[in-house]
Amino acid sequence: MNDNELSKLFEKIGTYFGQLLRRMETLIEKLSKQGAVAFQRGDLTTANAILKQVKQINSIKKKINGCRTELDRIFEKRQGVPPEPCPLPVPPPGERTPERSFRRPILEALVELGGSGLVPEVLDRVEEKMRRVLTEYDRQSLPAGDSIRWRNAAQWARYRMVQEGLLARNSPRGIWEITELGRRELIRLQETARG
C-alpha cells in the first residue's frame, strides 16, 4: 500500500469515527433533554437513571475518541507532524467538548471568585478559560434554542460535581459554591495537568 492509499484509508477511518461520534452525541442530547425534564419535574429517579445511561454512552464515546486520537498520532508520526501541547484536551473538529473538561475550569473559577459565585459570572470565567478548547459545535444553540451547548454541558458537569460533593448541595439558587473536597480535587487536577 503506497502513502497516498494509506492516507486515504486513514481519512476514511476518521470519517467513520466522526459519524459514529456524531450519532452518539445526538443520542446524548436526546437523553440529556429527557433528564433535564425529569429533573425539573422533581423525578430524580428517572433523572438519575438517564444520567447513568449518559455516563455509559460517554464512557464508550471516550474509548472511541481514544482510538481515533491514537490513529491520528500514528498518522501524524508517519507525516512527521509533532503534536501540539494543550492544557486541556481538545475534541476533534465538529465534536462536543467532553463534560469532564469543564471540571477544572469550574473549580478554578469558583476559587478565583472567593469560593462561590453567581452562575453567569462563573460561566463567563469558564468560557474565558476554555476559549481555545470550545469548538464551533459547543458554541451552537441547542435545538430548543434556550441555551448554548457548552453552557448546558457545564450545567450538567456542575450537577455531577454536586453529586460527588465537589460543589455545595445547599447553596442558594443561582449560586455555585466549591466545597473543601472540591478544593482538594482542584489541586489534584492542577498537579495532574502539570504532569
Image (cartoon, rainbow, N blue to C red):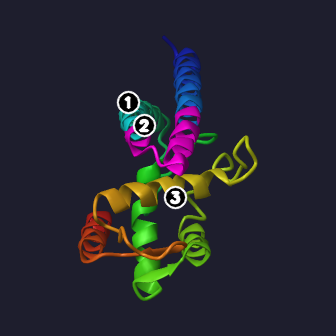
Q: Residue 46 got which mark?
A: 2
- Residue found at the far top of this picture: 1
- Residue found at the far right of this picture: 145
| Discs 2/1, front | 2
Q: Between marks 2 and 1, how big is the CA–CA gap?
A: 21 Å
Q: What kind of secondary structure does the magenta stretch mostly adopt?
A: helix
Q: Between marks 1 and 3, how big is the CA–CA gap?
A: 20 Å
Q: Residues within 10 Å of mark 1 (few under 14, many from 20)?
A: some
Residue in front for this viewpoint, 75 or 37? 37
**Three-letter amino acid code at disc 3?**
Ala
Residue hosting label 3: 154
Locate residue 98, reporting x and y percent: 47, 47
Rendered residue at 54%/50% (across/down): 40
Tell me if 72 is positioned left or right of 168 in this view.
right
Rendered residue at 52%/58% (across/down): 155
Residue hosting label 1: 60
| Discs 1/3, front | 3
Highlighted magenta segment, given as a residue range:
30-48
Q: Quadrant of residue 4?
A: top right
State which tag comes first along the sequence, 2 or 1. Answer: 2
